[in-house]
Image: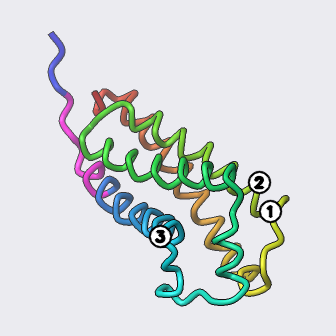
Amino acid sequence: MNEPVKTPWHLWVVGIVSLLWNAGGINSYLSTKLGVLETMGFEGEALEYFYNFPAWATAFWALGVWGAFLGSAALLLRRKWAVMLFGIALVGLLGTTVYQQFVAEVPDALATTGQLLFAAAIWIITLSLFFYARKMAAAGVLR
């Protein structure tokens, strides 16, 4: 019989930190869908930009944020489907990136170096979480 693999301490750190990080994405998504972005300091063209995402771009955004959040929860629950959920998050992030970089006219207020660095951080973190989950699944930590 196979003995259960002990949960490494770093899984808890990665799981909790990534759950909090991805909760930020959920907050942004829900604030947009509930029409309360003004409370986050957005105004003018930035509000119009976010409130006018086409349905397909909104669907990709939802896949990205919910896939990543649920993937973090799955990590904490030690479930193999964390890998699939982070994969879904990557598909969502890809679709959102295509919209933002190649389709939409991004307002100047959102076309800053800081925004580009933030977008790069989202990619790096999401890819890292996907590969981390794969490694934990391969090691038998995720069931």
Looking at the rendering, in which quadrant would you find the N terminus? top left
Cα distance in 3D space between marks 2 and 1: 5 Å
Mark 3 is surrounded, within 10 Å at the Cα level, by few (under 14), some (14 to 19) or many (20 or more) other residues, namely: few
Q: What stretch is highlighted in magenta?
A: 5-13
- Type of amino acid at the residue the image marks with label 2: Val
- Give the camera-side residue of 9 and 104: 104
Kindly identify which residue carries mark 3: 34
- Type of amino acid at the residue the image marks with label 1: Gln
- Of circles 1 and 3, which is in front? 3
Q: Where is residue 34 in the image (x, y as percent from the top left)?
A: 47, 70
Is 96 on the left-hand or right-hand side of 90? right
Mark 2 is surrounded, within 10 Å at the Cα level, by few (under 14), some (14 to 19) or many (20 or more) other residues, namely: some
- Looking at the image, is mark 1 or mark 3 earlier in the sequence? 3
Q: Where is residue 127 in the image (x, y as percent from the top left)?
A: 56, 49
Kindly identify which residue carries mark 2: 98
Q: Position of residue 36 (x, y in %)?
A: 48, 79
- Residue 7 on the magenta span: yes
Mark 1 is surrounded, within 10 Å at the Cα level, by few (under 14), some (14 to 19) or many (20 or more) other residues, namely: few
- Of circles 3 and 2, which is in front? 3
Residue 101: which numbered mark, if any? 1
Q: Identify the residue shown where x is 30% and y is 32%.
A: 142
Quick check: marks 2 and 1 in contact, CB under 8 Å? yes
Quadrant of the rendered image containing residue 103: bottom right
- Give the camera-side residue of 7 and 63: 63
